[in-house]
Amino acid sequence: MKTGKIKKTIRPSERDSITGFSSKYGPGTNYEDKLRGKKIFGFILAAICIIILIYIGFFITDVLIRFTEIPAFIHYNPEAFTQWISSLTIPG
């Protein structure tokens, strides 16, 4: 049986690393570049979605306005209307 001093465990922040930290692993792009690319892609995708939502809003508003407007080519003529109604009645 060994009789020696028992070493205390060292916290993870105090341990010596076997290798130095490297943000790049392998032949591909490093981690920061990947995160930056994902962040830029997210911003572009969000901007495109906002533009599409604004366009859809304008389109729906335009369609609803067109449904509620009275067309310019329809003119109400009361004399012609009464003649048409009187032609439909059965003489007698």
Image (tube, helix red, strand yellow):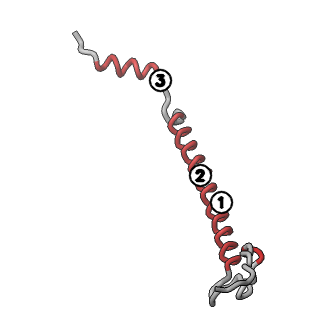
Q: Which residue type does callout 1 highlight?
A: Ala
- Could you tell me which secondary element the residue under label 2 belongs to? helix
x 71%, y 84%: residue: 3
Please provide percent x and percent y for residue 7: 74, 79
Q: Please state which of residues 17 and 78 is positioned toward the viewer in this rendering.
A: 17
> Spatial distance from mark 2 to mark 1, Cα to Cα?
10 Å
The image quadrant of residue 22 is bottom right
- Could you tell me which secondary element the residue under label 3 belongs to? loop
Q: Is residue 61 above or below residue 19?
A: above
Which of the numbered marks, if any, corresponds to residue 47? 1
x 35%, y 22%: residue: 84
Q: Which residue is mark 2?
A: 53
Q: Which residue is mark 3?
A: 77
Query: Is 50 on the left-hand or right-hand side of 5?
Result: left
Q: Which residue type does callout 2 highlight?
A: Leu
Count the marks: how many?
A: 3
Q: Is residue 21 above or below residue 90?
A: below
Asked if marks 2 and 1 touch (Cβ < 8 Å), the reply is no
> Spatial distance from mark 3 to mark 2, Cα to Cα?
43 Å
Q: Find the residue positioned furthest to the top.
A: 92
Q: Please state which of residues 2 and 30 is positioned toward the viewer in this rendering.
A: 2
x 64%, y 65%: residue: 42
